[in-house]
Image: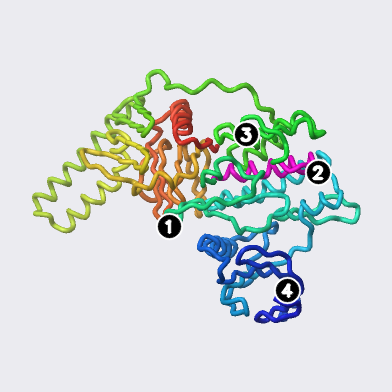
Amino acid sequence: MLKYELLGHYTIQQHLGKRAGQETLLALDQRTQDLVVIKLLTFNSELNWETFKLFEREARVLKELQHPAIPSYLDYFDIATASGKGFALVQSYIDALSLEEHVKSGRTFSEIELKQLAKEVLEVLTYLHNRYPPVIHRDIKPSNILLSNRPDNYMRQVYLVDLGAVQAATSEDGTRTIVGTYGYMPPEQFGERAVPASDLYSLGATLIYLASGQHPADLPQNNLRICFEKNVNLSPAFIDWLQWMTEPSLEERLASATDALEALENETLRKQKLVVPAKPKGSRVRLTKQSNFIEIFIPPKYFSGNPLLLPQSFLTLSFLCFFLWGTLESRFHPVMLMFSGLLFWINWRILFKIFGQVRLRIDEETISRRIKLFGIELNLPKPAARNEIIKLERTHTYIQKSRKGDQTVVEPQINIWTGTKKFSIGGNGFSIGGNYFTIAENRLFTITENRLLTEIELDWIAYELSDWLDLPIIK
């Protein structure tokens, strides 16, 4: 498009970039007199379906995000130009140079500046990755991080831009796309797979570029590891942290932006590998792991470890039998039927923690979890596709407050996320409603089994799941 040409109520000021089927423009909003960035997608011979899907996804995701370090969504509309029909995505303009432009202009970064830069980007990634589902950038590199300066050249504000490769971490339409930039992409993205830790690798590679002045792909490698140590002047602790960020294996890499930030702020050095968690003595959990499936069976707890469960269960079953007898005698009178159902609903948690059993199974096709009580089996939640698993989470005890100010102790558990749905084992009780089991529009599922699993058992199961799924454990 020509300079000063009108596009709706936007006047084109400058061409910022162009690639197959797409064009990025700097424009002036005639209504507000603010500069904006317009991304154009034109339907022509250069456009392919994957490019259109990524463009549409960027607009959808950007509209949902609100963060001072991410461009703001402003507008989205159809266009008709001499090149053809298409779409325009309008976002706020950030007056700042990219890290790549800073380096090419001769700027160098001290270790203090690199650490500050890393912290600011990690805070943005924490925001993105903690959304449901997690938002993965997939193309973090020097040209996609902007840095504004003060007159004294000291770092001021960091911005993360170009969400054109962004992925809401769930399989869409059963397809996956290889996106990213060579040298900054982690190995798993070449296999059409991206998880939150993938962005950490890209950030680490970006910092290596800033510290060494060399493209990561131009540095030597050993078993896919970037060998940058001789090309930088950094402290051993920071070098160790960068190595941790850019581990080729997901299992060896820092798992989350929160973990990476904590390790950086505390100058945590990686210690020798911890002893591999093993099944604790006396555990009744049965874990079967083969090359094509992993299955975890949590048997009924019965009355072990809590003598009060015996009279509690006796009273519960007595009440249930009494009301069941009353219902039968009344020939299923609606009132008795209602009371029987209500009593069973209220006491379901008590009965399940004593007599219930849980079976979690993951094979090459699906992940499922079945709960069983008195011969009744249910899939909770609904089984999901194996390739939709994107995060393995090991939580710790925390206090959850309700809107009324009530506090609930939520015990540790393991969550396996498949997009916006999670399969959970562990925790402190089975209930439907409230803090333990929720069904909402975002399809968040949580089931817990009243501390059926100890901390040691959770560590062991989390390790085995991590090993089989080849996913890091996020804590």
From the top left corner, tell me how far across and down residue 124 is, in percent.
Answer: 66, 51
Asked whether disc 4 touches disc 1, contact meaning CB atoms under 8 Å apart, the reply is no
Whichever of labels 1 and 2 marks the residue nearer the N terminus, that label is: 2
Asked whether disc 2 touches disc 3, contact meaning CB atoms under 8 Å apart, the reply is no
Q: How far apart are marks 1 and 2 (CA)?
A: 42 Å
From the top left corner, tell me how far across and down residue 339 is, in percent.
Answer: 22, 52
Tag 2 residue: 113
Disc 4 element: strand
Q: Nearer the viewer, residue 413 or 418?
A: 418
Whichever of labels 3 and 4 marks the residue nearer the N terminus, that label is: 4
Rendered image: mark on residue 435 = none
Disc 1 element: loop
Asked whether disc 4 touches disc 2, contact meaning CB atoms under 8 Å apart, the reply is no
Outermost residue on the right side: it is 152
Quadrant that contains the C terminus: top right
> Residue sitting at 65 percent across and 63 percent down?
19
> Residue sitting at 74 percent across and 40 percent down?
208
Tag 3 residue: 224
Task: Give the amino acid type for the residue marked by disc 2 in the picture.
Answer: Glu
Q: Which of 465 and 304 is in front in this view?
A: 465
Neighbourhood count class around disc 1 (C-alpha, 10 Å): few under 14, some 14–19, many 20 upward: few
Outermost residue on the front side: it is 45
Whichever of labels 4 and 1 marks the residue nearer the N terminus, that label is: 4
Outermost residue on the top side: it is 281
Rendered image: mark on residue 173 = 1
Q: What stretch is highlighted in magenta?
A: 195-216
